[in-house]
Amino acid sequence: MPYGYHQKILHVYLADLRLEIETPPESFYRKYVGGSALGLYYLLKHTPAGADPLGPENTLILALSVLTGASISGQSRITAVAKSPLTNVVGDSQAGGFFPAELKFAGYDALVIHGKAQEPVYLWIRDGEAELRPASHLWGKTTAEVDDILYEELGDKRIQVLQTGIAGENQVRYAALINMANRANGRTGMGAVMGSKNLKAIAVRGRQRPPMADGKGLNNLARWGASEFPDSDVYGLGMLGTAEVLEYQNKSGGLPTHNWASGAFEGWKAIDGKTMARTILKERDSCYACTVRCKRVVEVTSGPYRVDPRYGGPEYETLATFGSYCGIDDLQAIAYANQLCGAYGLDTISCGASIAWAMDCFERGLITRAECDGLELHFGNAPAMVQLVEQIAHRTGFGDVLAEGSARAARIIGKGTEQELITVKNQEAPAHMPQVKRSLGLIYAVNPFGADHQSSEHDPSYGDYPERMAQIGLTDPQPDQVLNREKVRFALVTQYLYSALDTYDLCQFVFGPAWHLYGPEQMAQAVHLITGWEASVEDLLRIGERRLNLLRAFNAREGIGRAGDKLPAKFFKALKGGASDGITLSEQEIETAKDLYYEMAGWDPETGYPSRQKLEELDLAWVADELYGAQA
Ligand code: SF4
């Protein structure tokens, strides 16, 4: 009997509205586990090299893991995988909420979505029964409106809905998938992929909870975690949300400001976690069964920016991209922009960063008023920022250009605007600066789906959490601003661990080494208690390494390797002001770090592709055959 999972994958063939259930063997689950790795297996099998990301040959996979739905904090997450319309290489994004656990209870471990429907449809799954239904009446509606219509239509307010929004319908390249109207698979444009398939929403409900191998042991671990919470490092996050880190980021010179010209924002205090808690916070919210409750719910009832609590509240990244990136210190305007992104289904990072890039270009005279619909696009102009979010989602006026993402927008506009980009593989960088956390420079460059802040541990953790780092073999802490051999090893090993988190679909705030309620050893313990499988920290790292190699292999098949692992020119300019005044990255240190990284990862240093030997070592000979041809 499988513990923790159903052994059921639902294939959805949209072209002929057909559904098929696959029942893979236990060996498949032991090897690919769930989340990102399981999704990548199907992506490599079903999406041909060179596929148009917005064409019917792209495959969208929504995958849970063998741990999803268990009664412990941090397990209700879902991974979306497809070829990305933003990066044109692999796309990969995670979200929490109640939808992931409910999909498990509805009877499936993953959904593999093929082709394109002729007319809009939605998928309804209840206790293992699945059907496709017409969805033209949901098209053009906000996410909360769609939720309300489906509650009514399906006669149950306890259903959970994951959907693409108006931005996804319009194929904005960084459109998100949204559940609960406020949780996002935000990065890499997965909402645009779902929109391109005419699949508007997925509604789920069920009571099919898979048994746990040792439910009593799991309950003991969960109870222990809940009792530790008030004294844990994650307690502040529970109280102030991710906005807690904004103050620290500014103090250390790592809060991206004015499109990354500086790492210090003079208006930081007006938009930080404490100010939010004192002014617009209505309540804290949670994902299914989580003790931490780090999600924000904000409300604004008067003034130009009225915010409905249904749309949650801004995370740190959102406060930074719509705030400090754009030089905006109006918390209500930022909360309103966050609401628009939830209502229309937009990634707040790429959206805010693309607007900040346009503001920077406007300030430099590279974009004229005529080109941006007469807007005075100066830093600090909150009404212009809010107007552009509307225009991007609906692809009107200048918003149609920014809906392509800033890298493509720079190619459309020209005039040297590419010099102000902060993109890697066309994806806008999140709000953590590699100038002050050096290993992030390397990870931003080499990460297969573009610059990402949740793909490895950040530099300060090496010295701050020696006990947890020792659990993954890291015992030689290095200063934040060096990128030597040991720091490269830190980046790669923690990347394996984060890669395992995204494969087990676990929340980094609960199971990640820095924030954690549970450390890597307890993560292995949870895997054992839920599935009954033997699991060690080494096993977790191996599973993470396998997923990272699958990601790289997808890109290699597209011909993207070392040459694509490139940081933007702006990262090599000295920062101005604050604690990071004058600090810069050097191209040479990044290239040297890449050499070390590829060598440690077992990849070809010339191409950056996973070697046949490494793929075979990870039991991925079929992937090696895809890349290098079958061996005689
Ligand atoms: S820590 Fe926050 S994001 Fe993570 S599972 Fe809990 S409530 Fe969700």
Image (cartoon, helix red, strand yellow):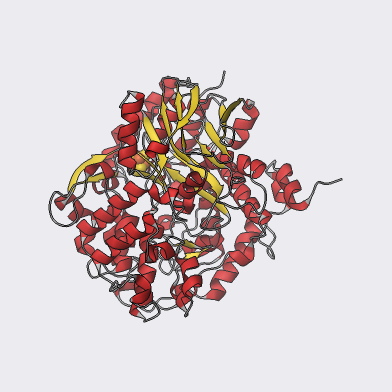
Taking the image as shown, residue 584 lies to the left or right of residue 327, namely: right
Q: What is the x, y in percent for residue 335?
A: 25, 54
Does 125 sit above or below residue 440?
Answer: above
Judged from this view, the residue extending furthest toward the right is 632
Query: Can residue 472 be spotted in the picture?
Result: no
Judging depth in this view, the residue of 162 and 228 nearest the camera is 162
**As drawn, is 322 to the left or to the right of 555?**
left
Most distant residue in the top direction: 1
Question: Which x, y percent locates residue 154?
Answer: 36, 25
Residue 300 can be seen in this image: yes
Residue 595, given in percent of the width and then of the height, sits at: 63, 66
Q: Quadrant of ligand 1?
A: top left
Residue drawn 38% across and 59% down?
Answer: 392
Left or right, 24 with reference to 166: right
Against 229, residue 418 (above or below) is below
User: Residue 157's image quarter?
Assistant: top left
Of residues 453 and 374, the one drawn nearer to the viewer in this rendering: 374
- Quarter of the N terminus within the rendering: top right
Q: Quadrant of residue 623?
A: top right
- Residue drawn 59% across the image and 40% down it: 115
Residue at 46% across, 59% down: 477
Residue shown at 18% from the left, 56% from the top: 275
Whether residue 384 is situated above or below residue 93 in the rendered picture: below
Image quadrant in which the C terminus is located:
top right
Q: Position of residue 514 (x, y in %)?
A: 40, 49
Residue 347 vs residue 383, the one in the foreground: 383
